[in-house]
Image (cartoon, rainbow, N blue to C red):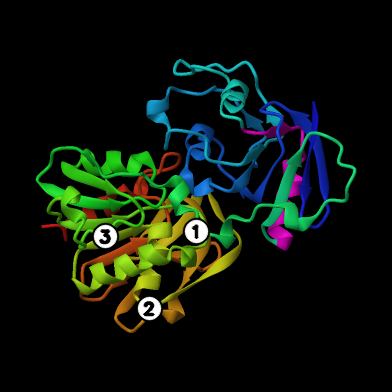
């Protein structure tokens, strides 16, 4: 069936369906990675978004079993690709990408000029859009499109109860704002016990008995505007005041900055891909990173007690912050990767130095 992507400025891209043929809407964003679509599609940071994959061939290695996913389901609202391969070849493939998308009810269009679409998003910035499969008699209206930045969407992607992984002596509380599974794997393989808690769980509150004693806090990645996560920001502010070792990843970096009194802002088209170079401002070491974010920390808003840790070498935006004297640190990129390079994995060890 023919489908179309309609952007909020009225631009229409036509293509063919290979997923579920249902209407959807969300924020249209692009990812420049050449591989890793199973991990990207299951990344909760994409909740509320229609994902455009710029690499022209998708589906050629199928879909692996769920233990390789970054969450229990596909998180995107829709998927746009140039060419879909329906005959995958890989020893870990369990089904085709098209079958997986249909099972999970995700609308998808192929045959769209993703190069033209990406150039438009880079020039004008990410915008809202709608995927349709039937001719609409009424004129397209912007107000009909879902905007994930206008509400707190963390309840849709966070765990519902306290969960424990690993048996290590060090216990790290993972505040789940839409955490990728490889964050947990990365800590557990380092001998850490991980206690995963919902986005609004207060580790210092009277109901925190289920979390047990803990030695550090990790604030996960997640979707949406960080300023909408008011409860999480309030909780993290109390944790900082208690001088508890705290590490933020992606959205967690923005939440930590807001809790410390800083500000965040929306990027024009964000950073989504697996080849983003950042520079460590302390040792001048460059790291190639995996990224997926549409907001950034305004370093000028941070107090005199904070240092800029990493800087993006493409556009100069902040990619990490660190307190001058206290055990608080955060990065805007994904040290757990999946997909992408694993060069940033050492940052988990950097955090664990503070976790006694």
Q: Where is residue 161 in the image (x, y as percent from the top left)?
A: 30, 44
Residue 198 on the magenta segment:
no
Residue bearing the label numbered 2:
261
Alpha carbon of mark 3 to alpha carbon of mark 2: how far? 19 Å
Q: Quadrant of the image for the C terminus?
A: bottom left
Q: In this view, does 168 lie to the left or right of 313?
A: left
Residue bearing the label numbered 3:
202
Magenta residues?
106-124
Q: Is label 2 in contact with label 1 (beta carbons under 8 Å)?
A: no
Disc 2 residue crowd, few under 14, some 14–19, many 20+, Cα 10 Å = few
- Judging from the image, what secondary structure is the residue with disc 3 in? loop
- Judging from the image, what secondary structure is the residue with disc 1 in? loop
Q: Where is residue 46 in the image (x, y as percent from the top left)?
A: 53, 47
Q: In this view, does 21 lie to the left or right of 88?
A: right
- Judging from the image, what secondary structure is the residue with disc 2 in? loop
Disc 3 residue crowd, few under 14, some 14–19, many 20+, Cα 10 Å = many
Residue bearing the label numbered 1:
152
The extreme right residue here reads 137
């Amino acid at each position: 069936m023919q489908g179309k992507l309609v952007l909020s400025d009225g631009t229409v891209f036509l293509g063919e369906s290979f997923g579920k043929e249902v209407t959807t809407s969300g924020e249209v964003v692009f990812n420049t990675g050449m591989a890793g679509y199973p991990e990207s599609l299951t990344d909760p940071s994409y909740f509320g978004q229609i994902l455009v994959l710029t690499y022209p061939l998708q589906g050629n290695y199928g879909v692996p079993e769920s233990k390789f996913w970054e969450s229990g389901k596909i998180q995107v609202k829709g998927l746009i690709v140039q060419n879909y391969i329906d005959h995958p070849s890989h020893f870990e493939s369990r089904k085709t990408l098209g079958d997986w998308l249909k099972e999970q009810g995700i609308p998808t269009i192929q045959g769209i000029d993703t190069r033209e679409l990406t150039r438009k998003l880079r020039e004008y910035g990410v915008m809202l859009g709608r995927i349709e499969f039937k001719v609409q008699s009424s004129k397209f209206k912007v107000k009909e499109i879902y905007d994930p930045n206008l509400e707190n969407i963390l309840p849709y992607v966070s765990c519902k109860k306290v969960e424990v992984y690993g048996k290590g002596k060090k216990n790290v509380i993972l505040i789940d704002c839409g955490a990728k599974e490889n964050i947990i794997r990365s800590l557990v393989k380092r001998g850490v016990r991980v206690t995963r808690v919902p986005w609004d769980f207060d580790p210092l509150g009277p109901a925190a008995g289920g979390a047990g004693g803990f030695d550090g806090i990790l604030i996960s990645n997640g979707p949406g505007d960080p300023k909408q996560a008011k409860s999480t920001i309030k909780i993290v502010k109390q944790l900082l005041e208690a001088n508890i070792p705290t590490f933020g990843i992606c959205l967690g970096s923005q939440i930590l900055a807001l809790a410390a009194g800083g500000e965040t802002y929306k990027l024009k088209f964000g950073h989504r891909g697996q080849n983003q170079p950042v520079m460590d401002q302390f040792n001048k070491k460059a790291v190639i990173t995996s990224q997926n974010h549409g907001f950034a920390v305004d370093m000028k808003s941070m107090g005199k007690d904070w240092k800029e840790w990493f800087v993006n070498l493409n556009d100069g935006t902040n990619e990490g912050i660190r307190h001058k004297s206290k055990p608080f640190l955060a990065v805007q990129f994904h040290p757990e990767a999946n997909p992408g390079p694993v060069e940033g994995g050492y940052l988990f060890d950097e955090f664990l130095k503070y976790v006694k």
